[in-house]
Amino acid sequence: MFDSTHMKTRMRTIAMVLFSAVALFLMCGLMPNYAYAAAVDDVAAEIIGLKADPTAYSASDRAWVEGVLADYNALSDQDRADLDARHGHKDTDQPLGRVLEVAVWSVHSYDSIDNWTTLPDGIYDASTTPALSSSYSKGKSTSPRQKPWSVKSVTVSGGQATATITVESDTYPGLWMGGKTYPNTSSSGNCEFEGIPIDLNSTFYFAGVSSSMPIPIAFSLTTSIEEPAYVAYHTVTFRDGYTEGDEGILKSEEVEHGMGATAPEQLIRDGFVFYAWDKEFSNVTSDLTVNAIWHKEGVNYYTVTFYDGPDGNIIDTIENVEEGSLVTPPEVSKRPGYTFVGWDHPELLDNVTSDLTIIAQWMSDDEVSAEAVRKKIEAIPAVESLIGDTDNPAVAEAGKAYIAMTEAQRSLLDPKKEQLRLVRALIAVLPGDPFDINLDTQERVTTPIKTAQTAYGLLSEELQAQLDKEAPTSSRTYGRHLESAVWALDSLRPINDITILKDGTYSTGITSTSTRGKSTSARDTTLTVKSVTVKDGHVTATVECSGTSYQTLFIGGKKYENTQTEVGAKPQFEIPLNLNSTVHFSVKSKSATEETEAVAFEMTVSADEGSMTPDPKKEDDDKGGGSGGGTDGSNSPDGGSPSLGPSNSGGSNAGNLSSLLRTGSTGTGSSSANGALADSEASKSASSKSNNVAGKGGLATESASANGILPINLAPAIAGGTLFAASLGCLAFALRFVRREELLR
């Protein structure tokens, strides 16, 4: 009996399964088209970038055009058809397929023309035997103009073919092909172009320069004519080998291509014995001159064979070398990655007394480069004479060459003998006193310091440790000497002392650490930031020295004197400073003379700018003061990233001299947001300043995903995943529904 309920259940089940199938079809069938859309648009953009004028291309554009063509050919047939019909080029109303075709035809018009033919001399056209025919094409052009082109005739002279080409129009003053324009030679009627070299029985490309069109039009022409089979004859001339001019000719004969010649009868020459002919003539493929070879009676003759070296291939064999003669070696072909440096026994070639085997000698390009640098290092004077000689040319030249070497080339230098000697010299020439590295000398000393820094960083840790112990002078080791110079150079950077702190003096919430790096001095003097004073967002720090001898501090290209006048008081210096950063400076004692060297320090300063408040005793004076803003890192001398928030974080190289010397980095500030400002009294001002900074372009570096926008290349995957998940859900629901209906029955 018919069960209407059961039938409805079955119909609903079928409908859900069909829906799932349609969803799967959309995912599998439509998603590939979506995925390929970007590729099609990329190729379209490449084609739009091509030139519309075929005469604007040169032979050097071939790689560019063929690259676009390869991308076009990689598309599906449907995608190519769509591109062929798409418009959008700025210079022409032709579809993109025609624009690409014009570019391809244009660069191929530069193909070399081998217009040699076996046709006898004469003029050939459609009425001759053999008859000449041609067909033209304007390819994918959609222009309704029909102006047929044809090869009117071909003129053959001396086996070379040139064409007269005509077009059924009087509006073409020129024909362009391969970068050359041929003028119209007809005074009325159809235009004609004469003397054009072409390959017969082939297709060639050209452009018609029309007076009625803004851009020349690209065409192709295919010619057809029956060329007779080629049979060539060559002249073989036999000479006696010792007489000049016609008198030395023994015999001449015409030999069919590929056949052999017949040598003259037995030869006689007083005092000599005929040995052989100098060339093979059993398979003649070109005109040939064959000379007789003679040996003197009672004289020995030898063979000298030249080999290329590593592969054992013969470069040249010189036979019949008379005893005692001099042999000139052949030219040697280049080997990629190697340099020819001579022959293994060149002295034997000056007086040949036996059969010889001479082998080419090679050095890898890396070995050649290493040898060149090795010689520069050997030319460096003794280290003792280089102390402070910053401008020494031998050291500078060797250092520059060493830095330019590849890792493979440097590995060919002896680390302890050559690399270590160079780095010692590079460090020894640096100024010994950090105070001597100032704004006046900065330009002159920057390159030597950075070269020494880079070369030191290329050494192994073992060799660096050795230099950290060796001392070129009594006052410091090589490691400390280099470190002092690097720190002194870094101390010249302008101080970008911007803070979000409001005006006032702060003595709490600030921490600082100082180090003398690789100094071997037993003195444990330290410098500490005691407090900072903020005025209009600028920071002035009070730095105190634990000892009493230092009286002058050098930072930012300026000198700052001890502000303490009380006898026995610890020296203090009021200097501009970057909070949350690592800085370098130098100090010199009160007893120092001109010859006394300053001491270089590194100091890292940390401050919680989001929660700090001015000292209570200063608070009344600070009311109404403005708050600082974030720094625009794009304007910093280090080229760092712009601030995206209101506080600054310190440089990355604090306390890490090994990293500093290896990488050449001297530490730069980076910016970070500080959420603690939300409840601070200066939050509004800081927010305003931060927004101003962000307005300079700092936020432009944020990724699209950070703004909630997914990268475009994830769209197909997300859409596909969504469809797939929906389809599986529908199918599971349908099966569950069917199972439930079955159970209910």
Image (tube, rainbow, N blue to C red):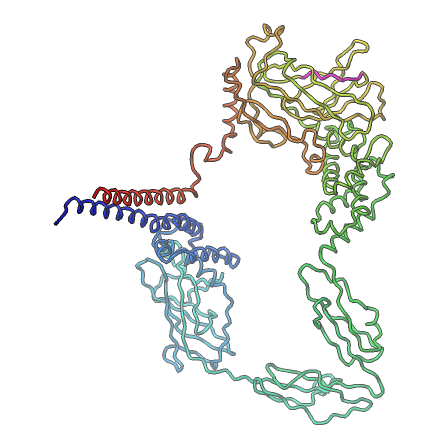
* Residue 542 is a magenta residue: yes
Comparing 134 with 382, the one in front is 382
Q: Quadrant of residue 362?
A: bottom right
Magenta residue span: 541-547
Q: Residue furthest left?
A: 1
Comparing 727 with 374, the one in front is 727
Q: Is residue 471 left or right of residue 181?
A: right
Comparing 558 with 129, the one in front is 558
The spot of residue 60 in percent (x, y) is: 53, 57
* Residue 598 is a magenta residue: no
Residue at image location 80% in from the left, 75% down from the top:
356
The spot of residue 505 in percent (x, y) is: 63, 12
Comparing 600 with 164, the one in front is 600
Query: Against 534, is 412 above or below?
Result: below
Q: Main secondary structure of the magenta part?
A: strand
Residue at image location 38% in from the left, 61% down from the top:
172
Q: Residue furthest bottom?
A: 265
The spot of residue 606 in percent (x, y) is: 64, 21
Query: Against 153, is 512 above or below?
Result: above
